[in-house]
Amino acid sequence: AHVHVANMLFVFCTVYALSCFSGAKGSVFQAAVDGSVTTQFITHFWRSTGFCPPLPHQNASFILSDDQFQNLAHIGATPNRGIQQVRVHWLLDLVSARYEANGTVDYNFTALDKALDMLFDNHLRPGFEIMGNPSNMFTDFESKDQVYLWKDLVSQIAKRYIDRYGLDYVSSWNFETWNEPDNHDFDSLNFTVQGFLNYYDACLEGLKSAHESLGLGSPGQQCSPKQLFCLAVLQHCYNGTNYFTGKKGVEVEYLSFHIKGRGSSMVIVNDTIDTFEFIQTYFPDFKDKPFYNDEADPQSGWSSPEVWRTDARYAAMVVKIIALHQNYLFVRYPSQDLNYQLLSNDNGFLDYGPPNYFNQRTLTARFQMNLTKPRSVELVRKPVLAAMGLLSLLGSLQLHSSLMEDGVPVVLTESDVGVIASLLPQGESPTATYEASFLIYRSNDTSNRSDDTAACHLTWSGLPPMGDNAVFVHWQLDNVLTNPFSIWLAAGRPDYPPYELLQAMRKSMDSLAISPTPLPFSASGGYNFSLPLPSVVLLHACQQPPAPPSKVSGVRVHKIVDGENMIIWNSVPERCIWSYEVAMATDTSGVYQTVNEGYNTLFSVFVHWYPGYRLGTKLCYKVRAVDYWQRKGPYSDPMCANV
């Protein structure tokens, strides 16, 4: 009954959304886009997440669990590779070590191999923090023997994975020093400041001995005058002496900081400005170094339960923070002044379970189905992960836009509403066609206020001609249309949701196309829509490619539990994709039927529940892409698995 009510609510809200402009209450926003004026590049600097395995860090069972496999599958399935990096703490604790009789050290990399394979298989790369202590072997980095032993370990690791994956892949990794050293979370190590500098040099030289193209970033924390390790590393890299070479000035590839919001979007932006100006003042030669904020979360404390993390409030705030960087920070400090390259949300964690399935800093909600035999886990994507999919549809050139509220120009740093307008040129499109994307967010940060719906009137002009068959799609995230948390809440917050409830949540977990079909698009025009608080809207306009979507490849079938499979595939290169169709046949029938009707399948993963299954039944799956013009690409080759 709860599921039926949730589905009826979903249908009602879809009808409500289609009333758009006329039913809005509150402010009226007017946004205007001039497609003839480009203002700056959009580098998609936000395509990263991260997590920390729980204690004990040496226990590989968590990071190699089916729970983590599914989590990474969902993250890696973000459309258009909208997330590419997962920054992971304590990776070296997955390595075990022992001294041999001849005095050499034998390392066992099996668990680390498996962890990195999971990232590789899901088209992700690690943010590789050189962090951890294999079998607690290291104790003193002021010991010359241990410093050289660490250099050798890092060199072995880098060479091993160059051999395993290839140099192109490994050279794309962001190698980084120990996370937040001023917090002194070193496990069994007891770093002195000098020992940490020796450790830095050993990491750097170990990487360089594997291949000259590999580099190292630091300090990996927030910096202030009271934080000795951070300041010492910066000073060491600026004009210190390399432990191994004796040369003055130690290479650092990028500067990494942790600048969180304390519940406010603008706190992140303002503290970033303070950090950058600190670097300019005291380390002016570092002005052009790549600048990373690889923990740019709205609020610290990933496991602290916060109700705003459950739904579109979190999604809209993440988008707002990114937009404030693009629209404000990068205008105040253009790329020639601030070489800002990465903003990462540290939200790839798995929740701790009851009752905090949705309200921790995660991209998915994890239900540990302890009553199944064997135990299984069910993940539901949260709207914040769907938002990363919407962001992936932005182009590479930002277009000039203006925004007014009730006829008054909006002050960007004070408004709940913002716009990023973009163009993807023909030369950068996989189909050699134009795309235009208009992203509009409405967020009042971590506030729980959601008491009105504004109206938005968007106009555009001066865009390149896209032909008679150009269309656009209105994608939307809000707390009515796309809210799996509210469906779970209405069902009584069950710890073990039945499959019907899981299906209902999954049908509402991704951005929704407001119109049942794409709408005609021209180089100049206008569009009215409602803008609830909170919400993220993306209008995606596409010139029609000459051919239907490509053939889907790389289909995999992962068994979750008897009768339930996770189907994973490689997304097609085309970007104007309406959905993917997943078809299934049994080994007895051989007749394929679509099994994801009613789902908005934009991520390249789908969980299929097969009621009435019989053990030993072989289920075969194939997948195809459908574009905005409802043209269907060829099916993938089938992939079969036993129930």
Image (spheres, grey):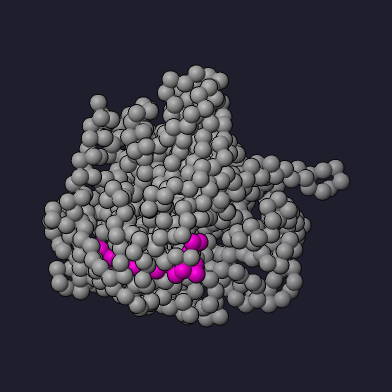
Counting from the top left corner in percent of width and height, residue 343 is at 45, 62
Q: Residue at x 75, y 43 (%)?
A: 98
Q: Is residue 410 magenta?
A: no
Q: Is residue 474 above or below residue 421?
A: above
Asked whether 536 or 296 is in front, the reply is 536
Q: Can see residue 379?
A: yes
Asked whether 275 or 609 is in front, the reply is 609
Counting from the top left corner in percent of width and height, residue 625 is at 46, 47
Asked whether 467 or 371 is in front, the reply is 467
Q: Which residue occupies the extreme right position in the image?
A: 102
Q: Can see residue 73?
A: no
Residue 42: image quadrant is: bottom left
Q: Residue at x 68, y 67 (%)?
A: 213
Asked whether 237 or 460 is in front, the reply is 460
Q: Quadrant of the N terminus?
A: top left
Counting from the top left corner in percent of width and height, residue 97 is at 72, 44
Q: Is residue 411 above or below residue 27?
A: below
Q: Is residue 416 magenta?
A: yes
Q: Residue at x 46, y 68 (%)?
A: 426
Q: Residue at x 53, y 77 (%)?
A: 288
Counting from the top left corner in percent of width and height, residue 524 is at 28, 70
Q: Is residue 298 above or below residue 93?
A: below
Number of marks: 0
On screen, residue 145 versus residue 289, left or right, reads right
On screen, residue 197 versus residue 155, left or right, reads left
Residue 421: image quadrant is: bottom left
On screen, residue 641 versus residue 549, left or right, reads right
The stretch in magenta equals: 413-431
